[in-house]
Amino acid sequence: MRRAGVAYLFPAPRRVALSNLAPHYFVNAFRDSHGLDLLFEGEDRSLIDRKRPNEFAVIFVGLSYEPSYLNFARYLHLHGIPILRSDRPDGKFPLIIAGGVAPSLNPQPLLDICDAVLCGEAEPMHGDLTAILNDPAAAREVLPRLYYAAKPGKKPRIAQAAAGSFAVSSHPALTGEGNEFGGRTVLELDRGCVGTCHFCAARHLYGASREADRHRITHAAEEAFKRGKDIALLGTGLESVSYFDDLLDRAIAAGRTVSLSSVRIAGFTPQRASRLAAAGVKTVTLAPESMVVATRKRIGKPLTDDELFAAFETAKAHHFKVKLYLMAGLPDSDSAAEAQAIGAFFAELKDRRLTVPLSLSVTPFCPKPGTPFRGKALMPKKEYERFRDTVQRGAGKLMPQMPVEWFSWRESLLQTAFDRMSAAQGAAFLAVYADGGELRAAEKRSGIRLEDAANETQKKGTAQSK
């Protein structure tokens, strides 16, 4: 079979995949020059040229979330592409190059599967990727020499775009394909983080906050407004971006609406809330992570109770719904006391008459590579269940109509396990999983228990973090 061209695979259903901006970036960067196409989970042919995966010479793979490794492995298997790199003779199958947030944290589980794992942001890689696409036959010699190409057993070096050198938004040609933002045009305003949270990979992987190019983002927003599109803004510290308020004003002037990934509580002022309301924002996402002040200080998020209640006062005054994000099992915390503190917080909200339409999301803490908490433990499943039961009893009495979303402990286990697996472990587990698609069977047949993988490097990580 003659293989030619390049595809970008985001191993998720199309609507979910296009909610991530990476496919949009790759289409913009390489569609005109190299005919780049898109591949999605559950679809046998590419989006644009209707080619089968095995017809491409090169497949880029975007992996933003560790559990998507499972989807990736199954995708290769279902399309007749051997999982292990050693089982793919040169020229017989596509060259597979992976990247994204998850493998940048720990590329090891993918090293025996992919021909290369590239760590960091795509913009600084553009010249190298162009050279590879110009001569795929020479790529296997070029890829190992790239400083951001992962090496076995070594800490990854991260490619990082300079402030103002990136500006990613929904590609106009893909707007009709839908996304999880109601079909809005999505704009990324910043990378890295202005915060100092010890649990979050954003700051520790990508550094201090950097803004996207103002003129290019503004132009993308104005073009969306001309097409009658609303916009969604993504970033870790949106309200700290120098042109954030200007984008809101432009949306208001155009009669369009805005949705947000989240707002930091410190930046949720009454003045900004008025502007958000005028821009059609209905819901704000607040993430204090814990209702215990001492815990918030310990995790690098020194938010006071007064600041938190002030945010609810602002939300109530401007008729916002609130999505509240919390974590269970934060390091060195008492999970029973943390759960009880959530009920106490809701009681205080009612006493202060600050109740607003409210939803709660709780996720188990995951120890991420590169962070100060990299060596900490994932809370045991039974402890998470006790935490959930305590919160549900307390919240059920005080907020009986409040929707509560409990993120899967199993997915947190997968994140932690893949973040700590070696190359040999990752290859063995994913190769077996790809064949059957069952986690328990994969554990049994590969001899790798996910809980063991999640815990086996904990002591080493703890020692490194001291």
Image (tube, rainbow, N blue to C red):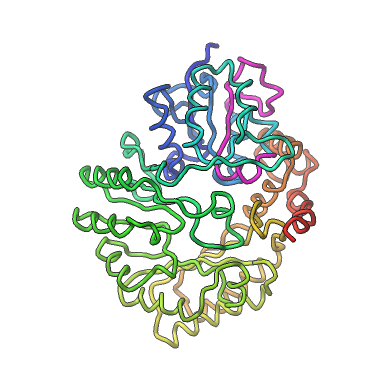
Find residue 355 and report its horizontal and vertical position in percent: 40, 79
Magenta-drawn segment: 79-108
Find residue 57 and report its horizontal and vertical position in percent: 53, 19
Q: Residue furthest top?
A: 2
Q: Which picture quadrant has residue 78?
A: top right
Numbered label tally: 0
Please state if 233 lies on the left or on the right of 194 as rendered: left
Figure check: 2 above or below 101: above
Q: Residue at x 29, y 43 (%)?
A: 220
Q: Is residue 427 magenta?
A: no
Q: Which picture quadrant has residue 64?
A: top right
Figure check: 310 above or below 262: below
224 vs 267, nearest the viewer: 267
Find residue 70 and report its horizontal and vertical position in percent: 62, 40
In the rendered image, which quarter contains the C terminus?
Answer: bottom right
Please state if 421 lies on the left or on the right of 260 as rendered: right
Q: Is residue 96 magenta?
A: yes
Q: Residue at x 35, y 37 (%)?
A: 171
Please state if 36 lies on the left or on the right of 397 as rendered: left
Q: Residue furthest bottom?
A: 351
Find residue 288 and report its horizontal and vertical position in percent: 51, 69
Figure check: 218 above or below 356: above
In the rendered image, which quarter contains the N terminus?
Answer: top right
Q: Residue at x 58, y 79 (%)?
A: 341
372 vs 260, nearest the viewer: 372
Q: Residue at x 44, y 33 (%)?
A: 26
Figure check: 361 above or below 413: below
